[in-house]
Amino acid sequence: MAGLARWCFRHRFVVLVSWIVGLIVLVGLGSVWGTNYANSFSLPGTPSTQGLQLLQTKASSQSGDQDQLVWKTSTGTVRDAAVEQRMAATMAAIAKMPEIASVTSPYSAAGAQQISKDGTTAYAVVAFTQQANKLQDADVKNVVTTADAAATSSLKVAMTGSAVDQVNQTAASSSEGIGVLAAAAVLFLAFGSLFAMVLPILTAIFGLGAGITVVDLLTHVFSIGSLAPTLSALIGLGVGIDYAVFIVTRHRRNLMRGLSPEESVALALNTSGRAVLFAGGTVCIALLGMLVLGISFLNGVAIASALTVVCTVLSSITLLPALLGILNMKVLSRRQRRRLVERGPEPAEATGFWAAWARVVEKRSKILALAAVVVMGLLVVPVHSIFLGHSDDGTSPTTSTSRQAYDMLADGFGAGFNGPLQIVVQAGSGGMDSAQYDKLATALKGASDVGLVEAAPLKPGAQIGIMEVYPISSPDSKQTSALIGTLRGSVIPQATSGTSMTVYVTGSTAIFYDFAHVLDSKLPEFIGVIVVLGFLLLLLAFRSLAIPLTAAVMNLLGAGAAFGLLTAVFEWGWGLNLLGLGSSGPIEAFLPVMMLSILFGLSMDYQVFLVSRMHEEWTHTHDTRRAVRIGQAETGRVISAAATIMICVFMAFVFGGQRVIAEFGIGLASAVAIDAFIIRTVLVPSAMQLLGKANWWIPAWLDRVMPHVTVDPPESAQAHRSDAPALEDAGVSS
């Protein structure tokens, strides 16, 4: 790493120009080829997927997404001539649009039940030719625009459904800018230098820009969802700034201790740069661990996020040394440069708040460890009530068209009308028996929590029958999830016993139900894999059993605390109104897997930077108490600053208008806060002080067979010497 640092330092302008040209080329290719994001995921073998595939094969015209056009009048009823004429014209216009299979009007015989009992609310079923993820946004937007144009002062019109939700999501385009501004403020306070503030941000922007453009190009090769670039930006911006901060901080400290700029950059990259490389690798491995789940939706997000992290790491270990070479001693503030000239190099041992806090932890390790465990335990409590599912339009802000349509349907017909279950009936070898088909419909009507069942009439010789089951409860409720289980587990098997019919419960609500259950069943195995992986990586890095074992326990405890806060906010509704995030609802089913992957990597970042400095001191003195104290004193400030930056970046994405991204933002921000200010500031150093020399113990036989990998090699004695060129390059006379 030192060799790479010296080369980049000496060829600084070549490196900078290469990055600029490379980024311009990538952006140019992206503008020519465009993007091909696809929000699709498959759950092979699940009943909802089997039913959907059957529809696509046998009844393709009825397999598309079905959304609702809803209207409500404040005067008279929807049957008034003026209202009927206006909405009939709107439905006729929509029916002629591309990607529209049919529009079932409430004014037709087939849609007679689509008018509320009080006559003030009605809806039309807008059937698209394909599922939402395969529709062109422009086609769906034309439908929504036509619907909106029908509204008057006394007639409210809105649309809801998967296709509408997909095009109405507010892009978090300003979130990156807000995050960068917040990070800049924290960096300026931490460094006191404008140039030092700009370096981490510039490095992260270059890495993030390269990562996102590469992902854009890869959408033509892999199936990557539209959530991927926003999530990649959230992760890449956070870790990119953090990685640069660690290297810049080490470089500035080296300069203040008397090293020349080139020697300082080489040493910073050979110590903190190695840790960045190791930490970035663990983040990528954790993200790519989602590939073992076999879910295409997560595969694309994992690949996109991992590639973005790779680009930020490359930027940190190549572009950053070049930028440090360009700035030379100006990476220090004027006051620091003046002090360096007047007083000479700083002492090797850290001073200030974090040095004092490290001494407190050393003396009060038992009490502080107990207090930290109690706090973490309280934060974990809400996890016991966590409900994984899919938040429907009822959790959206009241200003959105989907939420308005949802509320009108819920008021006029009941909450279950916002997420009907689709029952697909496949005839046996003898063809469809109409009596058995009617018997099934009757059984479905009698099931608990079912409000209405609509059975499509059978055509002569039909092999496929379709029914719509409208639950009483909302699509995202526990009652609707229980209903799906009841229909599949008892109602349908009893009604079809002795027949040759095969029945599938599908539709968007059932698909998300299956999605949640598939992920829930694989979650323990996934957690086991990433915990074992983390243990092995830390074992290899620090040649210790205690360090990776305590890290595994604390990482799980930290993740549990973060999920506890997430549950309290989004499921219990604490602070949702203040944040403008709509109403309470379930946590997205895929969020635990993705968050655990990200948190595993981020936790490893701080663990590596903290313990590597302790390990470095241990190799010098073999004094555990001193090693832990010095390690915490020298990394406390940079870890807290880096964590604050990451929290600001993550929280900036909370206000982007997308509930899913807001869940990630709050979840990751709280996890980083817990990790940096409780686990790495109190719990880890306290535990290591209590363990003493046991921190560094490893069986002799295991030490012999393991390969030797150094994350943060000890600094040489020469690295600490006073170097005259550093004073000459300071550019400040006494």
Image (cartoon, rainbow, N blue to C red):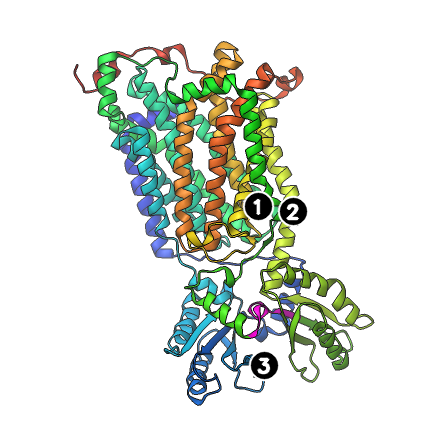
Earlier in the chain: of badge 2 and badge 1, it is 2
Give the camera-side residue of 395 and 646. Answer: 395
Earlier in the chain: of badge 3 and badge 1, it is 3
Residue type indicated by callout 3: Gln
Q: Which residue is mark 3?
A: 113
Q: Is residue 5 visible?
A: yes
Mark closer to the observer (2, 3): 3
Mark closer to the observer (3, 1): 3
The verdict on residue 386 being magenta is: no
Distance of label 3 from label 1 (alpha carbons): 41 Å
- x, y (%) of residue 260? 29, 17
Q: Which residue is mark 2?
A: 522
Q: Which residue is mark 1?
A: 593
Question: What range of the chain is rendered magenta?
Answer: 413-423
Q: Quadrant of residue 315?
A: top left
- x, y (%) of residue 450? 66, 70
